[in-house]
Each structure stands twice: as C-alpha cells, then as structure tokens.
Amino acid sequence: MADSTTEKKEVPENLLPGEERTEDRLLPDQALSGQSLPGQFLPEQPMAEEFLSVRPAADRLFKDQPEKDLAEKETYMSRALALAKEAAKDGEVPVGAVLVWEDGRIIGEGRNRREKDRCALCHAEMEAIKKACRTLGGWRLHKATLYVTMEPCPMCAGAILNARIPRIVFGAPDPKSGAFGSVLDLNAFPLNHKTRVEGGFMNGECSLILSEFFKNLRKSRKKEEG
Ligand SMILES: [Zn+2]
C-alpha cells in the first residue's frame, strides 16, 4: 500500500556510499527500526547526531541478523567495562573488549596493555581476538560479536575485518582515531569484508571512565611539574 512517509528518497550526489542526508538521520522510527541502534542510544548519547552522521553503510547488509537482547548486550559491555577499569588501575588507557560467540560463550577477552607490555599492538581488541582464535583453534571469528568500550582504531578495525567478525558493538566514539565512523569508516572502503557496527552503546559509562582517566593523568602530571 502506498504511504506518503515511505516515498522514494533522492540521494544527493555529494554523499559517500551509504551516507544519508542529514534530515534522514536520527529520525526515531529509523533509529529504532531494522538493525540500527538500541533504543537507549538516543537519551544516553549526546554525541549521537554527530556520530550517526557517519554511521557505516554495513548496517544495511545485516538486516536479517536477529537483534540481540538489550540485557544481554549490557551484560557483555559491562564485562568489557570491568576489563577497562582493570587497565586503568594499571595506568593504561581504559579500554576493554569481549568477544562473544553466537551461543553466548565468551571466547576471548582483552584490555589495553600498551604500557605494561611496551608494545603498540597491545590494544584490548587485539588481545581479545588473539585469545578467541586460540579458544576456537582457528582465525575465522565469523559468528562472533565484539563488544568494546571505545571505537576501534584503524589497526584494530583492520584486525576485526581480517578475523571476519560480523558485528561489533562499541561504547564511546573516538574522535581522534576511531575507524568505524569518527575519523574514517573502514566499512566504506571496497574491502572484501564488512562488519555491522553499533556505536554509542552504554556510551555514558564508557566515556566516563576515559574522561576520568585522562583527568587524573593531567592532575598527576601537574603535581609532578609543580
Ligand atoms: Zn586499536
């Protein structure tokens, strides 16, 4: 049945593949329908509009994937947050990651260990992926969801695609090096794999531990200088 609200929309030529017009973004019916974002996203996420403006096109590729239960997502993101807090205690930028197989098993966990391991590769996502590959005895994580407290950087985003992870849920957007929408969107490149991205989930808590960490860091540096 024809409906005036579902009229065909013109896509301006100056948009990137998958990008939507500003007025098409963040409409509640759109944000809450299909596979887009959890209902919690809008009230909890002050940066939602800015962030969603670069929401990856991949969302549309996974419309047939069943949406996970919100409570389940909270459970896994809370675990990732606990790992991030462990990292903060050790003086690491607090980022935590959890990889969950389709049956609900946690197959790998990780947290940032750059300082401790003195290695630029030791991001939370990399550790979780490494452990998951060991758990499964293979590199294809094609039935896993990655929960991570901060938007992955280009290195981790590349690893996520290489591991064939079909879905990621992240908390805080990273305006300095986020590779799933903030600085660049790896999904928008013609690579042979894409991942469905849900950003801004539990962003309030995920952002808070980061901002507190950097606030404390600045304080202690001031003390040292003074
Ligand atoms: Zn990273």
Image (cartoon, grey):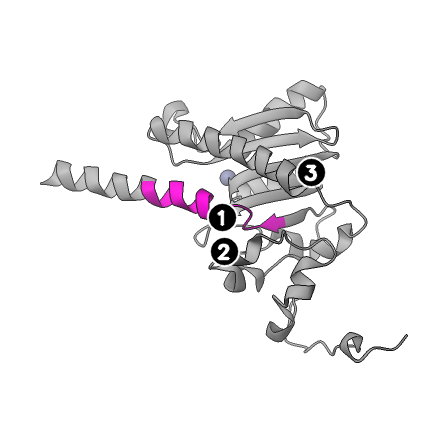
Camera-side residue: 35 or 217? 35
Q: Which mark is residue 203?
A: 1
Q: Would you call the spot at circle 3 few (<14 residues within 10 Å), some (14-19), or many (20 or more)?
A: many
Query: Is 201 contained in the magenta span?
Result: yes
- Is the residue under label 2 in contact with that under label 1 (CB below 8 Å)? yes
Going from N to C along the chain, the mark reached first, 3 or 1, is 3
Q: Is residue 25 above or below residue 57?
A: below
Seen from the viewer's position, the closer of residues 22 and 19 is: 22
Task: Quote the CA–CA distance across marks 3 and 1.
Answer: 21 Å
How far across and how far down the image is residue 55, in percent? 61, 58
Q: Which residue is located at x 67 percent, y 58 percent?
A: 32
Q: Earlier in the sequence, mark 1 or mark 2?
A: 2
Residue 7: which disc?
A: none
Q: Give the residue number, with chain letter if any, for mark 3.
A: 165
Q: Report if residue 91 lies within the magenta region.
A: no
Residue 153: give x, y in percent of width and height. 51, 44
What secondary structure predominates along the stretch shown in magenta? helix
Identify the residue at horizontal 62%, vertical 54% (top origin).
Answer: 39
In the rendered image, the residue lying farthest to the left is 226
Q: Which residues are magenta?
A: 198-212
Quadrant where the N terminus is found in the figure: bottom right
- Residue 210: tell me if it is visible: yes
Which amino acid type corresponds to the residue marked 2 in the rendered image?
Gln
Q: Residues within 10 Å of mark 2 (few under 14, many from 20)?
A: some
Q: Secondary structure at mark 3?
A: loop
| Residue at point 74%, 79% (across, down) | 10
The yes-or-no answer for disc 3 within 8 Å of ligand 1 is no
Q: Quadrant of residue 94?
A: top left
Ligand 1 is within 8 Å of the C-beta of the residue at disc 1: no
Disc 2 designates what residue? 45
Which label sits in the foreground, 2 or 3? Answer: 2
